[in-house]
Image: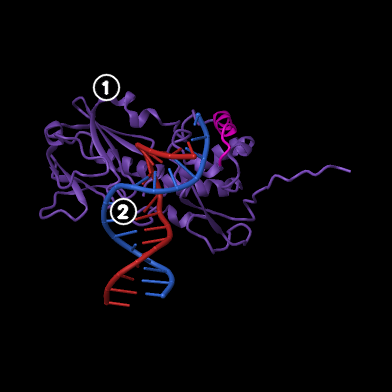
Chain colours: A purple, B blue, C red
Amino acid sequence: MPELPEVETVRRGLQMTLPGRRIQRVELFRPDLRVPFSERMAERLEGRRFTDIVRRSKYLLMHMDGLDVILAHLGMTGTFLVRPLSNGAPQKHTHLRWVLDDGQEVIYHDPRRFGLIVLLPSTELSSHPLLTVLGPEPLEEGFSPDYLAEQLSRRKGPIKPALMDASLVVGVGNIYASEALFRAGIHPATPAHRCAKKAGELVTHIRAVLMEAIASGGSTLRDYATAEGSPGYFQHHFSVYGKAGNSCEKCDSTIEKITQAGRTSFFCPQCQMLKVKKFRGKKR
DNA sequence: CACACAACCTGTCAGC
DNA sequence: TGCTGACAGGTTGTGT
């Protein structure tokens, strides 16, 4: 589900309600996610207050008034929902409930269980292995044209998987990589190093599409919802993602799809022409 | 080091 | 209607 715009939208929703709230009770329904919940989550969180909800890459960092930070990732299908306390049995894929001190509850729902919620001391945040491998935030200064050009110049593989590599830049997943490349007029199979001279445009388009998506509350394909339970709307603004067989909005060619590194890439063969390196025969 | 690929797990949808 | 296989927003580990 969630790329940067979706996680950021969830963060904003949680930031609206959680800071100042205290967790009264923790209920674990099914702790065996791909990465299991921290042991002793109840004893470490009950009685604690949220202070601040921060995002790094696609991770949510929920700072608590004690020493602990909740590090959460939504995987493909995870959702956090804040709502009035409900009674009765949890839904099939609801794995966690935090009962708050104001009559609300936070639930974590994740059918595929690719998500992750662990606790760690805030002092270990900067050295946590999940976070130290991450590249710059796309909406911050570190993701500069010079930086991107330098990174791309060292890569021989195709540009699209490179943009999805979190060690190069975080937050750009399958949807927004395709959309940004369409805007930049770059074929997803173009060798990354040949895109170095267009790094400035790529930075611009990646930032633009991410910011527009945030402004629309993210993209809802299936599972994604905000912390208030409402869907995003940016899926209505996709130019190429999921549109194979449709007409390109710019040129009327038919959108195509290919598989790269196990993921589907969508593109317009006309607007994103793959410039094949020409074989130069001997001049005569 | 860069890259491709399988694995993690469940639900959905297309096709037969 | 039911079965099967392909595929889905992400990340990590393994192998080349």
Residue C4: x and y in percent read 35, 66
Magenta stretch? Answer: A145-157
How far apart in space, not on screen, are marks 2 and 1 (Cα)? 34 Å
Residue A154 is inside the magenta segment: yes
Query: Is residue A156 part of the magenta span, yes or no?
Result: yes
Compare marks 2 and 1 and give the one earlier in the sequence: 1
Can residue A218 be seen in the rendering of this structure? Answer: no
Mark 1 Cα within 10 Å, few/some/many (few <14, many 20+)? Answer: few
Instruction: Name the residue nearer the viewer: A59 or A161.
Output: A161
**Amino acid residing under circle 2:** Ser
Judge left or right: residue A272 versus residue A10: right
Could you tell me residue B9's position as x and y percent? 27, 51
Can residue A253 be seen in the rendering of this structure?
yes
Q: In this view, does A120 lie to the left or right of A146?
A: left
| Image point (50%, 43%), residue name | A161
A187 w.r.t. A52: above or below: below
Instruction: From the top left corner, tell me how far across and down residue A102 is, in percent.
Output: 14, 41
* Residue shown at 10% from the left, 55% from the top: A88
> Of helix, strand and loop, which one carries label 1?
helix
Around disc 2, counting alpha carbons within 10 Å, would you say few (fewer than 14), some (14 to 19), or many (20 or more)? few
Residue at which label 1 appears: A123
Q: In this view, does A17 lie to the left or right of A215?
A: left
The C terminus of chain A, quarter of image: top right
Q: Residue A142 carries which label?
A: none
SS at badge 2: loop
- Residue A163 drawn at (x, y percent): 50, 40
Q: Are dots 2 and 1 on a single chain?
A: yes
Q: Which chain carries label 2?
A: A
